Image: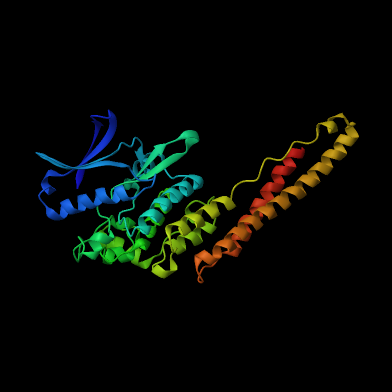
């Protein structure tokens, strides 16, 4: 719909981004209305995770323009293509930030309708952290337009198919906030696995895949990921709208809870220095005792870690809906492996 240029705000001498409506669309009343709606929507969203708008207007001989904050970073699409999947912590941060801006937007009755990696830019921060900004509000659904009949004609497909919910594929005009939550879940899936949950060589094949709703669980593609994420994605990508998360904040909170539940244990405190002065017999006896205690402590730590994960999963059960299930057999298998690894690690410290 437009082109974005970097520029300098004359009086303020400030670097800005200027988005111009394409010349071929400047005379199109519908395109101009959408461009105006984009500027108005960005101005209404008082959130750090969208670009700040400084000005909007027209000049003689110049297409309509929006003056915005200049963002210097990398879009998520390019980041995934060049560096591969994100970590669980990075994905949790992304979901939390996008959940924040979507909470604000949905509270205003705004549905973005085109959540995808190409519309998310990552700005570098300290210690490897990033700030994510959601871009391109050019095809939003907003109350003023919806109440007046809307800009989306019947039969029009808006959005990027592989990130679109089943209901958006059928009618972009009738979607609500839950379509954005579906799209964010697809983005999160790709961030973690590097793949899309639903794929097809043609548009029709893609639609059939999304309609079937069958996808590989993230823990199957990346075994190091917690299996609690599988249930999160089953809920987020449910074909039944009522089975999905009720809001962006609920969705982000559930993801963060899973992330916190798998944080690693603290490093054990070194043995007391006074033991170094004991006799060789005492050292041998002490070392054996420490190994036994370390093994017991590691198993206790492993069991405690499993209880924390189980408690977090059960606490999230209320958010996951009545049909949510947990694969306890797989959990027992992963838990046993974790307990054994803890015991081996602790025993090695005593050698």
Q: How many marks?
A: 0
Task: Name the spot of residue 291 as percent of width and height, x first.
Answer: 79, 43
Viewport quadrant of the C terminus: top right
What residue do we see at 43% from left, 45% from top?
85
Position of 196 compared to 174: left or right? right
Could you tell me residue 153's position as x and y percent? 18, 63
Q: Is residue 339 visible?
A: yes
Q: Is residue 250 above or below residue 193?
A: below
On screen, 272 above or below 180?
A: above
Relative vertical location of residue 321 with respect to residue 86 in this rendering, above or below: below
x, y percent for residue 184: 39, 55
Q: Is residue 196 visible?
A: no
The image quadrant of residue 197 is bottom left
For residue 96, side relative to residue 350 (left or right): left
Of the pair 42 and 337, the residue shown nearer to us: 42
Residue 140 shown left or right of residue 122 in the figure: left
What residue is at 89 percent from the left and 36 percent from the top?
Answer: 282
Which residue is farthest bottom? 322
Q: Is residue 173 above or below residue 34?
A: below
Q: Position of residue 263 (x, y in %)?
A: 59, 47
Closer to the camera, 28 or 292?
Answer: 28
- Residue sitting farthest toward the front: 11
Q: Residue at x 33, y 65 (%)?
A: 166
Q: How is the image coloured?
A: rainbow
- Side of 240 where 331 appears, left or right: right
Residue plotted at (20% across, 64% down): 148
Q: Quadrant of residue 144?
A: bottom left
């Amino acid at each position: 719909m437009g082109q974005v240029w970097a520029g300098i705000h004359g009086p303020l001498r400030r670097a800005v981004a200027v988005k111009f409506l394409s010349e071929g669309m400047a005379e199109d009343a519908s395109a101009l209305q959408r461009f105006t709606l984009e500027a108005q929507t960005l101005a209404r969203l008082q959130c750090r995770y969208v670009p700040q708008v400084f000005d909007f207007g027209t000049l003689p001989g110049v297409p309509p323009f929006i003056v915005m904050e200049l963002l210097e970073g990398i879009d998520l699409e390019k980041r995934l293509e060049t560096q591969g999947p994100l970590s669980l912590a990075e994905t949790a941060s992304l979901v939390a930030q996008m959940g924040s801006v979507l909470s604000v937007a949905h509270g205003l009755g705004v549905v973005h309708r085109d959540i995808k990696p190409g519309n998310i830019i990552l700005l570098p921060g300290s210690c490897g952290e990033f700030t994510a900004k959601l871009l391109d509000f050019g095809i939003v659904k907003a109350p003023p337009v919806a109440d007046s009949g809307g800009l989306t004609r019947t039969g029009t497909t808006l959005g990027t198919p592989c990130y679109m919910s089943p209901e958006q594929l059928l009618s972009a005009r009738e979607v609500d906030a839950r379509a954005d939550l579906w799209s964010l879940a697809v983005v999160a899936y790709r961030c973690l696995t590097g793949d899309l949950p639903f794929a097809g060589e043609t548009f029709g094949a893609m639609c059939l895949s999304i309609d079937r709703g069958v996808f590989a669980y993230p823990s199957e593609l990346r075994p190091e990921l917690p299996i609690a994420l599988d249930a999160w994605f089953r809920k987020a990508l449910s074909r039944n709208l009522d089975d999905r998360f009720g809001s962006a904040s609920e969705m982000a909170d559930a993801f963060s809870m899973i992330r916190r539940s798998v944080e690693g244990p603290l490093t054990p405190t070194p043995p007391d220095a006074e033991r170094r002065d004991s006799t060789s017999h005492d050292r041998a006896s002490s070392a054996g005792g420490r190994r036994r205690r370390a093994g017991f402590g590691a198993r206790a730590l492993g069991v405690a870690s499993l209880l924390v994960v189980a408690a977090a999963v059960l606490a999230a059960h209320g958010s996951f809906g009545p049909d949510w299930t947990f694969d306890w057999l797989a959990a027992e298998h992963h838990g046993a492996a974790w307990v054994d690894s803890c015991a081996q690690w602790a025993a090695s410290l005593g050698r």
